Image (spheres, rainbow, N blue to C red):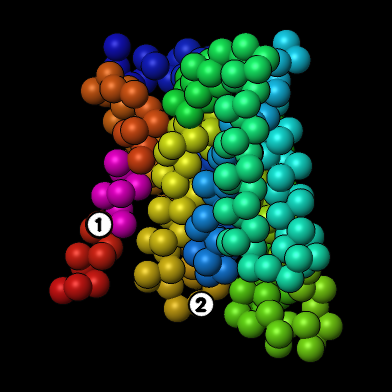
Amino acid sequence: MSFVDYMQIPLFQRAMLAALIAGGTLSLLGVVIVTLNLTVIRFALMHVGLLGAAIGLGLGASPLAGALVAIGAGSLLLGPWSDRMKMDTGLTGAFFMTGSMALAFLLFYKAGVPAMEAFALFTGNLLALAPAELRFILALGIIILMSFVAFYREIQLVLYNQELAESLGVPVAIVRNGLLFLTGLAIGLAIRVVGALLIDALILLPGLSALSMAKDLRSALVLASLFGVVAAVGGFSISLFFDVPTGPTITLVGVAILGIITMAKGR
């Protein structure tokens, strides 16, 4: 089948649209993660998702639904917990990560939860997206875009200097915690699209590539969105052409973009 033939099938149309939306919007949060040095957060929320999957299976529900609920709850708690304990968000993330993993393995053992079914979330499958999941990706993408447009000044100040932002009356905690929550939801969706182990392909790698070239936040966001679209849509298209898994292909395209930019800057 040719690429045009694939695009006549609703299954592949949904997957392509999801790649376009996810690549263009989830990647914006990579700029936030890199700038605020929150790289450990994605690992913490992945482990929280594993715990949620285990709870979902134990209750007879979908492991994906359990993972998404747990990730959403965890991202809501990370910021306030850090503020309450007066700890760096990264350290709080490490607490969430180790605690969630320990509880997940206890559930696997005591409740007889099938661990392999929970770990299957870590593979992802862009082609398995249901219409309802595509609508959720679209809704989150719109929310992310609207948040950056409506609160651009506040986000810019928080990313630049939180103490300065607070002195200017910006609600730093609310902005930061809101970004953490959106990041959590983005990670949950990235699990569905490319798998938990390849989350960086849609979120972190485009942000890293953009920040290595951009001169300000606006250009960083535009470039991150562009690189995210190229990685997601390009990787998906290549996977169809060569009949290989979509998640790893999207990731390799993202790695290639970052590698090319790094070599170009070195020259």
Image quadrant assignment for residue 98: top right
Instruction: Look at the image and tell me whether residue 194 can be seen.
Output: yes
Q: Which mark is residue 56?
A: none
Q: Residue furthest left?
A: 267
Q: Is residue 91 left or right of residue 126?
A: right
Q: Is residue 171 left or right of residue 122?
A: right
Q: Closer to the camera, 196 or 139?
A: 196
Query: Is there a contact, CB below 8 Å, between mark 2 and mark 1?
Result: no
- Location of residue 113 in the rendering, given as x and y in whole percent from the top left corner: 62, 14
Reply yes or no: does residue 257 show up in magenta: yes
Dividing the image into 4 quarters, which one contains the N terminus? Answer: top left
**Please, is residue 31 above or below residue 2 in the view?**
below
Which of 10/262 is in front?
262
Q: CA distance from mark 2 to mark 1?
A: 21 Å
The residue to which callout 1 is attached is 259
Q: Which residue is mark 2?
A: 216
Residue range corresponding to the magenta coloring: 252-258
Task: Name the quadrant containing residue 111.
Answer: top right
Q: Is-magenta flag for residue 198? A: no
Q: Residues within 10 Å of mark 1 (few under 14, many from 20)?
A: few
> Which is nearer the eye, 61 or 153?
61
Q: Residue at x 71, y 87 (%)?
A: 164
What x and y, as percent, mark residue 174? 80, 65
